[in-house]
Image: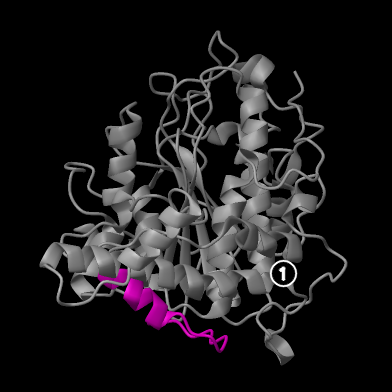
Amino acid sequence: MTAPLAPARPPMSRRRFLSLAAAGGAAGMLGPALWEQLVTAAPTSGSTKSPSTTGRTLVLVTLYGGNDGLNTVIPYTDPAYAAARGFLAIDPSTVLDLADGFGLHPGMPRLQALWKAGHLGIVHGVGFADPNYSHFQSMDIWQTALPQDPSGTGWLGRWLDKTNASPLRAVAIGPSVPTVLAGDKVQAAAIPPGPIQLPGSPTEVALYRSLAGGDASQPGLLAEAARSNANLLTVNATLGPILTKTEHANPLHLTGAEAPTLDGSEQALAAANGGGGLSVANVLSTQLSVVANLLLAGVPTDVFSVELGGFDTHTNELATQTALLGELDTGVGAFLDAISHTKRGQETVVVVYTEFGRRVAANASQGTDHGWANVVFVAGHPVKGGFYGEPPSLTALSEGNQPFTTDFRRVLATVLDQVIGVDPKVFLQGSFPQVAFL
């Protein structure tokens, strides 16, 4: 059976992509002191410097639900693939060829273009020993890098603790801080991508603003609440202009080699979505557009975290995964294109992972059940494109699953060393051979 192609949509240009953040806003909820730090840290001069020891920036893209890697990076020339997948096998005539008998899902043309440009690495067979079928425990293992006891801090949270870094060194775009960015002493900042909605009528909003103007003579908790509210309003006023500058042809007034080439004829976000404005279908692009605009504005953050859910495809997988992979492809591709004309953008690395793969054989509900090994994408200008790791066999299965061939901590060790610039064994509680994609 032929997998449905992603629905036709206008191409996501750099201008359209960057306008997402202007439409989505830059409001968020951080601690009172943290907002003040962010306001201070956000420069207005367009500086592209990062405090990272390597000068690189990491963008983690977490796919929640267990993406079906076998229908993402497809061994479409292997007869065992079609035999095992049956009606879920992607029509080989639609697969976007890569190399070595593998190709991408037909809804991922931007990632294929990155592959052809030599800026997409694909790591085969990534996983861990003694796998389980729990979304929560498997994701905890990935985010803590502690397979035996995944109840501790995140592997990047331990880095924040060790360096005693400002929480602004790592930022999650979303309502909460994921485990991967949570330390014992330091946690990342969380910035929801939606606008601030002040409560109530205009009179009540005015009252809220007046409460945010409290003074130091108030009791401790009232003074703290006032500072928190004031910082929230201040950050909305401070970061909002950074993002809305993307509505102009040269949004950050960059010059020379730093100036992006933008399409002056483009319309705002509504045009990109067929006139409908923001919708649930572009949630990842919205998050990544906020990251892009913060990078372009020179905010000194080394790690950003974004996420996309819905990959638990026990039923109706073909249509669901086509839509989700199309969103992943659009978001990552447009993000890298939007930042490609800056020095900071050329040192940005995107890592895409999910908690586990899915079973090789289809189930009776036109979907697939929880599995084991999977693929990891690594994209960006610093990446040495190509395949890494050994593809798991489609015939030598265990409990109907592909066993892992690449320990996931090898990927994390490479990121810690080559992107963050620290000794991986300090944060992974052991030494793991790196993967040569950087």
Instruction: Tell me where residue 276 sits by quadrant.
Output: top right
Residue found at the far right of this picture: 265
**Left or right: 262 as drawn, with respect to 67:** right
Using the image, determine if residue 22 lies above or below residue 300.
above
Query: As displayed, is residue 348 above or below residue 76?
Result: below
Q: Tally the numbered discs.
A: 1
Q: Nearer the viewer, residue 25 or 185?
A: 25
| Residue 217, x across and y down, in percent | 14, 76
Please state if 195 lies on the left or on the right of 137 as rendered: right
In-front residue for pair 78/117: 117
From this viewpoint, which residue is outermost toward the left?
219
Foreground of the two, 33 or 72: 33
Circle 1 residues within 10 Å: few <14, some 14–19, many ≥20: many
Write down the residue under mark 1: 247
Specify the quadrant of the image occupied by residue 317: top right
Q: Of all residues shown, which one is farthest toward the top?
A: 364
Q: Is residue 35 magenta?
A: yes
Q: Is residue 17 magenta?
A: no
x and y percent of residue 20 in the render?
A: 65, 58
- Residue 434 visible? The answer is no
At x 30%, y 28%, the residue is 132
Q: Which residues are magenta?
A: 32-53
Q: Position of residue 270 (x, y in %)?
A: 75, 51
**In-image side of 233 versus 165 (left or right):** right
Quadrant where the image shows the N terminus: top right
The foreground one among 317 and 90 is 317
Q: Amino acid at mark 1?
A: Glu
For label 1, the SS is: helix
| Rendered residue at 47%/76% (across/down) | 56
- At x 73%, y 78%, the residue is 260
Whole-percent x, y for residue 231 in the image: 35, 70
The quarter holding residue 74 reads top right
